[in-house]
Image: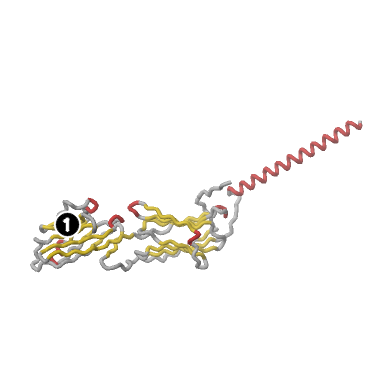
C-alpha cells in the first residue's frame, strides 16, 4: 500500500537543539574590466568617458546610451539637453546623465532602482568635433539571500522525517550544499529546488530526508559567489525518538490493544458459557 508523507510543523520541546552560527560576509567580488555590479533595488552609475571639447561647449556633443546589439534607447543627449522622446519605456524616469560633468568628458549614466531585468550589456556612444568614441559596459545584477528559515519534523521517527531550509530573495542562483558531523558532503542525499518569484529573484528550498537520530549534526551551506555571500548554518538533533500517548501512532497501537483485549474477553466468555451449558445438560441427564 502506498503511503504518502504529509508535512506538519510540530513542536518537539527538549528534543531538538538548533545552533545557528552567523558567519555572513557581503562584499563585492572582483569583476572583469568594463563590468559593474548592481544590487537589486539600489542605484548604480555605469561609467563612460570621452575626449571633451577644450572650449567646454556641448553644442556639438551627442551622447547615446542603448542596449548593445539592440536599437533600444536607454538615454540620449544632444543640442545641449536630454532628448528622451525615443527612450525605451523600461528606462523611463530611471536614467540621468551628470550634465555638470559632461564638459570634462564624463558621460556616465545613472540608473535608478535596478532590477534583474537590467542585467545586460550597454553601449555608450559619444560624438563630437573629435570624432566618435564608444565602448560596451556589462551590468551584472545581484541580490543577497535572506536569513534561512529552518523546519525540522521527525514525524515520530518514521521514514517521512526531514530537515528543510528555505532561503528567499536572492540572485543569481546560489550554490547549496550539506555536510554531516564528519564534514562529509551529503548533498546528493538532499533535494534542492529553485523557484523564481517577484522581480525574478530566487527562492531556494533544500530538504534533507530521513536525518539520523540523537546527537546528529548537519551543516547547511549557501554561497552567492557574485556577492561573496556565504551562509553556514549548523544544527544538532538531540534526544531520543519517543512516541507519546498523544501521538497518532500511539493512538493506533492503543486501539489495536483494546480490540485484541475485547476479542480475548469475548472468546473466554463464550468458552465459559459453552462449558457451563455442557455441565448443566450432564446434570439433567443424571437426574
Front residue of 15/186: it is: 186
Q: Quadrant location of the C terminus?
A: top right
Q: Is 42 left or right of 102, judged from the image as shown?
A: right
Residue 181: percent from left, percent from top: 52, 66
Residue 72: percent from left, percent from top: 22, 54
Q: Is 249 left or right of 218, judged from the image as shown?
A: right
Residue 96: percent from left, percent from top: 19, 58
Residue at 52% across, 68% down = 182
Vertical placement of 274 versus 11: above or below? above
Residue at 64% across, 48% down = 253
Residue at 49% across, 65% down = 185
Vertical placement of 95 versus 278: above or below? below
Instruction: Please give the residue where the numbered disc 1 appears in the rendered image.
Output: 76
Q: Is 67 left or right of 3, judged from the image as shown?
A: left
Residue 56: percent from left, percent from top: 9, 66
Number of marks present in the image shown: 1
Front residue of 237/131: it is: 131
Could you tell me which secondary element the residue under label 1 belongs to? strand
Residue at 49% across, 60% down = 188
Front residue of 121/202: it is: 121
Graded by Cα atoms within 10 Å as few (under 14), some (14 to 19) or many (20 or more), the crowding at tag 1 reads: many
Residue farthest front in this picture: 69
Amino acid at each position: 500500500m502506498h503511503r504518502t508523507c504529509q508535512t506538519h510543523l510540530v513542536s518537539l520541546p527538549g528534543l531538538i537543539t538548533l545552533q545557528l552560527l552567523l558567519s555572513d560576509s557581503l562584499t563585492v567580488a572582483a569583476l572583469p574590466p568594463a563590468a559593474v555590479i548592481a544590487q537589486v533595488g539600489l542605484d548604480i552609475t555605469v561609467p563612460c568617458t570621452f575626449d571633451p571639447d577644450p572650449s567646454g561647449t556641448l553644442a556639438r556633443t551627442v551622447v547615446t546610451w542603448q542596449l548593445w546589439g539592440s536599437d533600444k534607447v536607454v538615454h540620449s543627449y544632444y543640442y545641449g539637453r536630454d532628448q528622451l522622446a525615443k527612450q525605451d519605456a523600461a528606462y523611463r524616469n530611471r536614467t540621468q546623465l551628470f550634465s555638470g560633468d559632461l564638459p570634462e568628458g564624463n558621460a556616465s549614466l545613472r540608473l535608478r532602482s535596478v532590477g534583474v531585468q537590467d542585467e545586460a550589456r550597454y553601449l555608450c556612444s559619444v560624438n563630437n568635433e573629435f570624432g566618435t568614441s564608444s565602448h560596451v559596459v556589462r551590468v551584472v545584477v545581484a541580490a543577497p539571500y535572506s536569513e534561512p528559515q529552518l523546519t525540522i519534523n521527525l514525524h515520530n521517527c518514521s521514514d517521512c522525517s526531514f530537515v528543510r531550509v528555505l532561503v528567499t530573495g536572492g540572485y543569481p542562483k546560489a550554490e547549496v550544499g550539506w555536510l554531516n558531523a564528519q564534514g562529509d558532503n551529503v548533498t546528493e542525499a538532499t533535494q534542492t529546488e529553485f523557484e523564481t518569484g517577484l522581480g525574478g529573484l530566487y527562492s531556494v528550498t533544500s530538504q534533507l530526508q530521513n536525518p539520523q537520530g540523537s546527537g546528529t549534526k548537519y551543516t547547511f551551506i549557501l554561497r552567492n559567489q557574485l556577492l561573496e555571500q556565504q551562509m553556514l548554518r549548523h544544527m544538532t538533533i538531540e534526544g531520543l525518538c519517543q512516541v507519546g500517548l498523544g501521538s497518532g501512532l500511539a493512538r493506533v497501537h492503543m486501539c489495536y490493544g483494546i480490540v485484541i483485549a475485547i476479542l480475548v474477553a469475548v472468546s473466554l466468555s463464550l468458552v465459559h458459557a459453552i462449558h457451563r451449558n455442557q455441565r448443566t445438560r450432564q446434570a439433567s441427564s443424571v437426574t
